[in-house]
Amino acid sequence: MDNQVQPKRGRGRPGTYANASERAKAWRQKQKDLIAQAQKPADPVIVEKVVEVERVVEKIVRIPVAAPVSSRRPSKQPDAEKLFPILRTRFNGFKGEENAKRFRTNAARAATSARDIISLVQDGGAVVPEIEREFLQTAAFFFDRLNGVFASAQVNAKAKKAKAEREYKAKQEADIKAKILDTFGPTPDPESVLAMAEDLLVFDKAAHDYLTAKHHVDKAHVFVQRHYELRNAIRNQDPLKAARHLAEVRIEIDEHGRHWKQSDENSYAAGWQDFIEYRANANK
């Protein structure tokens, strides 16, 4: 009986761990492995049931997990040229050339800023994140192309502005020639032209008294902007310039005067026919 008495063994499995420290270390590692295995996603399992003659056998088939397919479609690069048909019509009006130049400058600054940001991040050996770097490079290229679009718009606006100025000057010259013909006839008499220029300067001074009495208003005037030019033409005895300036005044003040009322005050601006009537009465 004494030969069958076995010595009392200590805690743990005999011969497995040298001491309690190793056993505790192994236990902690086992816990970590169990936790990691529990957190690992399980593979989908399909259970196939095969019906045989007197028994049902369940067969487990494991399917490997495929990598998830991204739902994002490859993004298309923006094309500044597609904006040209729209933008080219935005600079046809007033100050079209100036506006196109301003937008061209802004586009160039935007492209430069995008490149400067990349250079700034790369200073000191830093690496620009891929998505942000691609975005900045795309933005720089886009605004470079947009700069070209605005440059084309600026050239077109400049050409249209020059054409409009030529057409305006041609029309203005035609109107002046028509007024000279209507005022003085095909062969203007130099003395008559200079005399009319002198009478217009006199009418300019007498307009207030004459027109207020005639039209029963509080204020009246004739809008003559070319006093200096008319005086020079009279002093230099230049009937051609005098006729031209008279025609310009006739266009500016129009044929007939106009009334208006402001703050309970009636006013009147003379027309060319008021001058003709004053001159006819003064020369009686």
Image: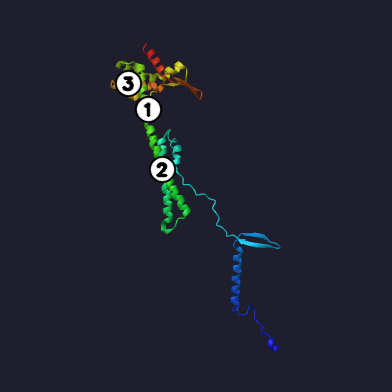
Q: Which of marks 3 and 2 is nearer the N terminus?
A: 2
- The picture quadrant where one finds residue 10 is bottom right
Asked whether 68 or 113 is in front, the reply is 68
Q: Which of marks 3 and 1 is nearer the N terminus?
A: 1
> Residue 103: where, in percent of width, then height?
42, 41
> Residue 250: where, in percent of width, then height?
38, 20
Element type where label 1 sits in the image: helix
Name the residue tied to disc 2: 147
Counting the numbered discs, the total is: 3
C-alpha separation, residue under disc 1 versus residue under disc 2: 30 Å
Left or right? Give the position of 135 relative to 190.
right
User: What amino acid is at disc 2?
Assistant: Asn
> Residue 165: where, in percent of width, then height?
37, 30
Left or right? Give the position of 211 relative to 177.
right
**Which residue is at 42% across, 50% downward?**
115
Name the residue tied to disc 3: 242
Element type where label 3 sits in the image: helix
| Residue 167 vertical position relative to residue 189 in the rendered view, above or below | below
Any mark on residue 167, and which?
A: 1
User: What amino acid is at disc 3?
Assistant: Ala
Any mark on residue 94, and which?
A: none
Asked whether 170 or 43 is in front, the reply is 43
3 vs 2, front mark: 2
